[in-house]
Image (cartoon, rainbow, N blue to C red):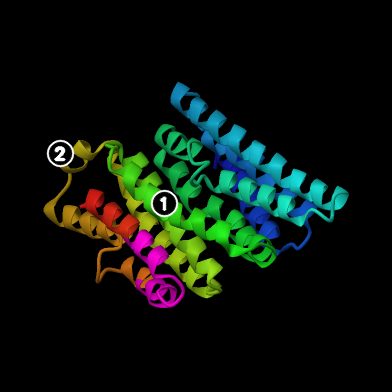
């Protein structure tokens, strides 16, 4: 194992450790430190090569995450200084987490970064790097806030991710906007107090996403036309790849549809309008994947 491989291994261990600390700690400052540690460990992995694209993508990621961490710490400062103004503190905290997750309305950095970095880094960005902000949403934001704002945000993401994804031809951007739609579903499940379903949803999404990203990395596909024009792709391989894509899109009866079905069956008891909105967003996502 060469020196570069050792450095990557150390950085990966730090990222894993920082995420574990963030999801197990109850102290805001400790969570903030672990988030910062995660950022500064992930940035060198994004800069694996010194190409202009990866540099631009890394800068977009670094600036957005640093701003999110600063706002996150600011919410703690406001809570200490103006402990009577709880609503402002929660609003700022929500804004920080939205920025860190890269979801609507602070989503602009996320598709750009996904577009410019390598597939393996896209995989980490879409799965592991989402864990800490989602846990903060679950255990810190939801118990302290009224759910109306979170409901609007989750519904907006489920709908907007599908609509914007229609205009994309880049595979990385399509998956990025699909991820935004999925995060909307996950947050909606958190709001209605079924965190176990949120966890199952995220795990299933990650399990389906991992082989898809690894496949795209192996065959070096960047745009839709590349996907089926590769002469090395056998027919069986194309069929398997199609099932993975449609599973992420949530096509019944594939695996990706199961958590959505559970959420719909519970959510329809709370709000039919919100249920219809997120279903429409999912159908739009399914449309452009097909």
Q: Which residues are magenta?
A: 261-279
- Mark 2, residue position: 229
- Mark 1, residue position: 179
> Badge 2 local density, few (<14 within 10 Å), some, or many (20+)?
few
- Which residue appears farthest toward the right when viewing the image? 81
Mark 1 against mark 2, which lies toward the viewer? 1
Mark count = 2
> Badge 1 local density, few (<14 within 10 Å), some, or many (20+)?
many
Residue 262 in magenta stretch: yes
Pick the residue in front: 158 or 180.
158
- Which residue appears farthest toward the top when viewing the image? 52
The tag earlier along the polypeptide, 1 or 2, is 1
Pick the residue in front: 267 or 251.
267
Residue 173, compared with residue 178, is above or below; it is above
Residue 59 figure quarter: top right
Q: Position of residue 163 (x, y in %)?
A: 32, 46
Residue 73, compared with residue 252, is above or below; it is above
Q: Is residue 127 left or right of residue 29?
A: left
Residue 21 in magenta stretch: no
Q: At numbered mark 1, what does the secondary structure look like: helix, strand or loop?
A: helix
Quarter holding the N terminus is: top right
Q: Residue at x 52, y 44 (%)?
A: 102
Between the residue at mark 1 and the residue at mark 2, the CA separation in whole angstroms equals 25 Å
Q: Residue at x 55, y 36 (%)?
A: 61
Q: Is residue 34 left or right of residue 84?
A: left
Q: Position of residue 224 (x, y in %)?
A: 23, 39
């Amino acid at each position: 194992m060469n020196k570069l491989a050792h450095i990557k291994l150390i950085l990966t261990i730090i990222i894993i450790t920082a995420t574990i600390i963030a999801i197990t700690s109850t102290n805001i400052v400790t969570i903030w430190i672990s988030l910062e540690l995660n950022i500064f460990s992930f940035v060198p992995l994004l800069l694996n090569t010194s190409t202009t694209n990866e540099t631009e993508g890394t800068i977009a990621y670094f600036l957005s995450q640093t701003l999110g961490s600063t706002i996150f710490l600011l919410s703690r400062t406001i809570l200490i200084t103006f402990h009577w103004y709880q609503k402002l503190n929660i609003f700022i905290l929500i804004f920080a987490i939205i920025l860190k997750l890269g979801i609507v309305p602070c989503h602009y950095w996320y598709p750009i970064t996904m577009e410019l970095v390598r597939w393996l880094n896209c995989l980490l960005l879409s799965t592991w790097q989402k864990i800490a902000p989602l846990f903060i949403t679950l255990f810190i934001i939801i118990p302290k806030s009224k759910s109306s704002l979170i409901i609007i945000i989750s519904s907006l993401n489920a709908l907007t991710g599908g609509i914007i994804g229609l205009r994309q031809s880049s595979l990385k951007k399509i998956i990025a906007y699909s991820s935004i739609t999925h995060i909307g579903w996950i947050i909606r499940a958190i709001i209605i107090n079924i965190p176990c379903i949120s966890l199952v949803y995220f795990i299933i999404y990650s399990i389906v996403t991992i082989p898809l990203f690894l496949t795209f990395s192996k065959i070096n596909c960047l745009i839709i036309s590349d996907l089926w024009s590769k002469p090395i792709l056998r027919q069986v391989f194309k069929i398997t790849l199609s099932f993975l894509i449609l599973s992420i899109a949530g096509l019944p009866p594939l695996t990706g549809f199961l958590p959505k079905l559970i959420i719909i069956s519970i959510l329809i008891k709370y709000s039919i309008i919100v249920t219809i909105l997120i279903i429409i967003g999912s159908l739009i996502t399914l449309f452009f994947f097909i």
